[in-house]
Image (tube, rainbow, N blue to C red):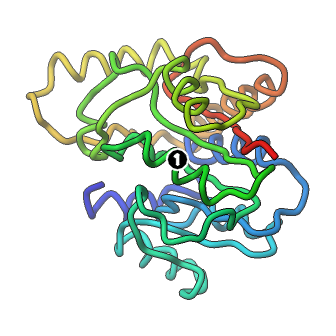
């Protein structure tokens, strides 16, 4: 991710509709039970760490970027619990964590299968992983370029990769389902009408009313996901388990 985007994330994570709604979905999958030892892989500027910290006994943040970890420290997160490293060579022992989150990470990594295997390795038997990534290569745009993405995923493709590494799938769904037609149109038009190779993060800032409405839409999706799999959307969210 470009350096200036970390500042933007830091400024937006608490109130911007996409981050607020996504964090609700993540926490629904994480559950309300206290977490013991947890690591947020690709913790970014630390917005999710703040949310997770309210129910976690031992919480680590991990990221490849010094800039991202700097913003975590600005949030007041303890430096000794922030780890820098590479996602395909995680600096943790086998069977280290009871739970893991990896939000918007896998699409940045060239060897994504190795990354999944690393997540499996560091989880204890019975441990759970919550993952979020981008969906549908058709929606590739300058937003992906600005975020240094390598690919976008399909539900069936990601599900197959997770099973190949030994994970048991507990839940896998699209989200941003209701807003899909509008957002997909913007992304596809961007690909056709923006200069090839352009980097532009598409995060328009709505007014307070619209931001609240969009947040409510994702909150409804978070509730629906408890019972159904949303058939399409801009992103994918899943919960997986390392079998006992």
- Residue drawn where x is 49% and y is 71% of the image: 91
Give how far across and how far down residue 194 sits, in percent: 14, 26
Q: Nearer the viewer, residue 33 or 125?
A: 125
Residue 156 falls in image quadrant: top right
Q: Residue furthest right?
A: 33
Give how far across and how far down residue 67 sits, in percent: 35, 72
Q: Is residue 198 above or below residue 176?
A: below
- Residue drawn where x is 82% and y is 63% of the image: 35
Which residue matches tag 1? 117
- Residue drawn where x is 74% and y is 75% of the image: 58
Residue 216 falls in image quadrant: top right
Residue 127 as seen in the image, left or right of residue 19: right
Question: Total number of numbered labels?
Answer: 1
Mark 1: secondary structure: helix
Give how far across and how far down residue 228 sits, in percent: 78, 17
Q: Is residue 104 above or below residue 191?
A: below
The N terminus lies in which quarter of the figure? Answer: bottom left
Q: Nearer the viewer, residue 72 or 203?
A: 72
Give how far across and how far down residue 72 sits, in percent: 51, 75
């Amino acid at each position: 991710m470009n350096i200036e985007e970390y500042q933007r994330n830091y400024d937006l994570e608490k109130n911007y509709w996409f981050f607020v709604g996504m964090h609700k979905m993540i926490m629904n999958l994480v559950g309300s039970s206290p977490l013991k030892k947890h690591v947020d892989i690709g913790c970014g500027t630390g917005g999710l760490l703040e949310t997770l910290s309210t129910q976690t006994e031992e919480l680590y943040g991990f990221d490849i970027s010094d800039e991202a970890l700097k913003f975590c420290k600005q949030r007041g997160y303890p430096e000794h619990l922030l780890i820098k490293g590479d996602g395909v060579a995680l600096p943790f022992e086998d069977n280290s964590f009871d739970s893991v989150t990896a939000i918007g990470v896998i699409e940045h990594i060239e060897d994504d299968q190795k990354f999944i295997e690393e997540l499996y390795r560091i989880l204890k038997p019975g441990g759970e992983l919550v993952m979020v990534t981008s969906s549908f290569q058709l929606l590739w745009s300058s937003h992906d370029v600005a975020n240094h993405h390598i690919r976008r995923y399909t539900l069936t493709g990601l599900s197959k990769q997770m099973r190949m590494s030994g994970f048991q799938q507990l839940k896998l769904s699209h989200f941003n389902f209701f807003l899909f037609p509008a957002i997909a149109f913007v992304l596809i038009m961007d690909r056709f009408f923006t200069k090839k190779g352009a980097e532009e993060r598409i995060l328009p800032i709505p007014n307070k009313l619209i931001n609240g409405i969009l947040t409510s839409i994702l909150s409804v999706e978070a509730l629906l996901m408890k019972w159904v799999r949303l058939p399409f959307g801009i992103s994918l969210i899943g919960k997986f388990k390392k079998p006992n």
